[in-house]
Amino acid sequence: MGRMALEFSERVRRIPTYPAAGAYALPEDVALLASNESPDPPLPEVVEAVTAVLGGLNRYPDPTSSRLRRALSDRYGVPSSRIAVGNGSCDVLLAAGEALLEPGAELVYAWPSFSVYPHLAAASGATAITVPVNERDEHDLDAMAAEITAATRLVIVCNPNNPTSTAVPADAVAAFVAKVPRHVCVIVDEAYCEFNTLDDPDTTLDLLKRHTNLVLLRTFSKVHGLCGLRVGFGLCGSEEFVTAVNQVRQPFFCNAAAQAAAIEALRHQDEVNARVERTIVARLEVEDGLRALGIEVADSQANFCWLHLPVAEGEDPAEVEGRIVSGLADRGVLVRAGGALGRPGSLRVTYGTPSQNARFVAELGALL
Ligand SMILES: *Cc1c(COP(=O)(O)O)cnc(C)c1O
């Protein structure tokens, strides 16, 4: 009998695949700097909160995440009816795509930006309008505003931007949101906002009072270091968005352990501040090390850096990137190649522990 190939839908054939960080079967001392994870293990109190729910796993989780939404409401001053939670913030993002997009509709975002955004258009049949970041690898908000048409349903601003690490100031975000028509949803993806030194991360909360079409997307995956549990949330300018993203998802999209961990994590703002301070120290050390190697680095406001490798005349940036990424991997340092994100010759490198950061800089120097 011949090999039968399954025939998948047009929708599935459109969805791009993004290479997974190939780290999961490697020896212990590998520096995992490819996925913007926290180098810090979960807080003991968070582990305790998770452990406490394990004996009740015969029950479904709270489908409305009511305690978590109340805790988020207390922390951020947004009514809990305007808070959407999810199995990671990507869950809320993909649900937004499903709720807002369809063939004929348009979605606007910068490029390079978060690897999940292209899924939204592919999965819905909507048209993605991508706006190149400027020469400083920052969002070009004026150019993005100019792309909004009668067909636009969703605009995403990733601030700070993954993978380019740069941020636009909060007043520029405010001016941009003010320009977008009220029927167009604006998601400001703030997965890394805690690490941003340009503005207080809570500055944008004010905008929710004026803009019913605004969603601030946040996560417990980065500064809180809980990406293994999957929990994120959207702070919304209206209840409509929450209702719509809940309508398109399966029930119980936020598991019991994740809800308990997130509630506990919110009680440890001092730890968030300590992690941010360590990240900023790492940022300065890595930037100094890279500059000493003669490497240009974008102005990072995140927990990772974005750099352009030196490419000589006649050299292929993709080839240089491939050689460096695999050379680093051979030396036990995993980083993310920019080519998969549309910028060959670039690297995205998460800050790890001080010794991992030093190791990355030293090994890169040796390879160059
Ligand atoms: C990591 C990241 C997220 C968070 O995803 P989760 O699903 O919450 O783990 C969201 N947006 C961007 C831009 C990210 O880099």
Image (cartoon, rainbow, N blue to C red):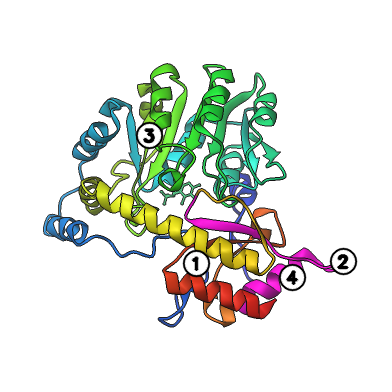
* Residue type at tag 3: Asp
Say which of marks 4 and 2 sits in front. Answer: 2
Residue 235 relative to residue 290: left or right: left
- Residue 320: mark in rendering: 4
Q: Which residue is depicted at the point 77% across and 64% down? A: 317
| Pointer 1 or 2: first along the chain | 1
Q: Which residue is depicted at the point 26% across and 49% down? A: 270
Magenta segment, which residues?
A: 302-328
- Whether 102 is drawn above or below 317: the answer is above
**Marks 4/2: CA–CA distance:** 12 Å
Q: Which residue is mark 3?
A: 202
Secondary structure, mark 3, is: loop
Say which of marks 1 and 2 sits in front. Answer: 2
| Pointer 4 or 1: first along the chain | 1
Q: Which residue is mark 1?
A: 33
Q: Which residue is mark 2?
A: 313
**Marks 1/2: CA–CA distance:** 29 Å
**Closer to us: 300 or 38:** 300
| Quarter of the figure that contains the N terminus | bottom right
**Marks 3/1: CA–CA distance:** 27 Å
* Residue type at tag 4: Val
**Closer to us: 248 or 337:** 337
